[in-house]
Amino acid sequence: MKRIPRSTSVAAGTIAILTFSILSKGMGFFREMLVAGLFGTSANLDAVFVAMTPATTLSGIIAGALAAIFVPVYHSIRKEDPERSRRYAGAVLISGSLVFLTMGVVFLLIPELVIKLFAPGFSDEVVAYAARKLRYLSIYPLIGGIESILGAILKSNRRFIQYGISQLFFNVIAIPVIFFTAPFLSEASYILAWILGNAITVLAYLLQSRELFTLRIGRGTSIVETLYLSLPLIFSGSLGVINNMVDKAFVSLLPPGRVASLQYAHTLLGLITFTISAFQMTAYTELSELIVADDKDRVKERLRKTVTTSLNISLPLAAWIIMMAEPLVRIIYQRGEFDSNSTSLVSMALIGYGALIVLSPISHTCSSYFTARKRLKA
């Protein structure tokens, strides 16, 4: 089998990821249209989305922190000893998996307590429903965590094409699962699709990265350094979880459908802003490599280009979303169980999220620089 060539620049990597992201996000739009048409903004869907919040967000913070700090540490080790970098990648996978398994056990044993922390306004009946769904999702932290680390391994090695191809598998699996199981599982079909779609993506990542890591933990793997450096990132990410918990807690006190409307708006925002995400993803890999090489001039140039390009994309995109929020939501979502009232709720939430389009890239670039330099205590 012919090996897929490595991408060799930020531009090439961005184009590679964008190409497959366009296909994946196109399917993502269809997936959200399907979910909206089947379930609208119901109380049960609120419960499903609240159950998914701790499973995806809490595990995502730890996985994101490990993946972010993995890149500069990996590049530093690979510069000195490529074989040791493979052992290091395996050590992060094993250590991270143990953490994610522990988190899953917590969700399995005390789901009602977790749900009440995120949605204290829910009735006992809805809390019980959401708690059952969180038990099903207890396997997700392990799946999502491994997916994030394997993705970091691919991106650290500039395997952007392989990373992009693997991303396609989520929606390829999720859409038919939702379509065929919704008549039997109702809103829970979304959970099943989420788990199976991400599980298949993990398998695709494993096939693409299997020669880049070895599952042997020994001395000199820098796993303690990685865990230590990831703590500030986990702490800062936890502040975002607190904000998320406050949002969900407040919205859970409102009439049914408000949690679902926030989730629809947030998902739509991610589908629209994938160009910025793809560019920043590839730029971070190069930034880490330049910092390891101690090329200060090129580091400054990379930072300047990253901020400038991100703003050139995000400013007009934010203006367009704010102006077109309602017709955009109506065209994409309004059919079946998703009525005009749902359109109003989601479009208002989308406008509220509009400022994040401009602020997030700047914040991400600054944090990426300090992460790549391993300066995380300040």
Image (cartoon, rainbow, N blue to C red):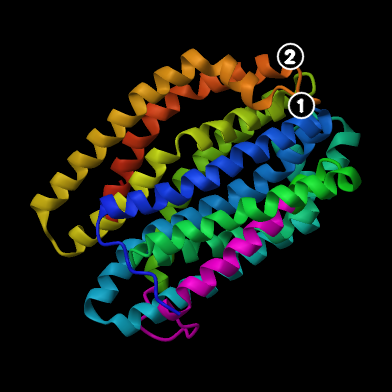
Residue kind at label 1, given as amino acid type: Thr
What residue appears at the point 66 percent right and 42 percent down from the top-left corner?
53
Query: Which of the pair 33/77 is nearer the observer?
Result: 33
Establish if 323 lies above or below 218.
above
Q: In this view, does 317 lie to the left or right of 171?
A: left
Measure how far apart labels 2 and 1 are at the Cα level.
Answer: 9 Å
Q: Is residue 217 magenta?
A: yes
- Dot 2: few (<14), some (14–19), or many (≥20) neighbours within 10 Å? few
Residue that numbered label 2 is attached to: 341
Position of residue 330 measured from the top left corner of the image (x, y, whole percent): 64, 19
Q: Can residue 85 be seen in this view?
A: yes
Query: Which of the pair 35/366 is nearer the observer?
Result: 35
Residue that numbered label 1 is attached to: 41
CB of mark 2 within 8 Å of CB of mark 1?
yes
What residue appears at the point 29 percent right and 54 percent down from the top-left corner?
12
What residue appears at the point 64 percent right and 38 percent down from the top-left corner?
30
Establish if 309 lies above or below 210.
above
- What range is drawn magenta here? 193-222
- Looking at the rendered structure, the secondary structure element under dot 2 is helix
Residue kind at label 2, given as amino acid type: Asn
Q: Is residue 44 left or right of residue 318?
A: right
Q: Does the magenta stretch include residue 131?
A: no
Q: Which residue lies furthest to the front in this view?
A: 2
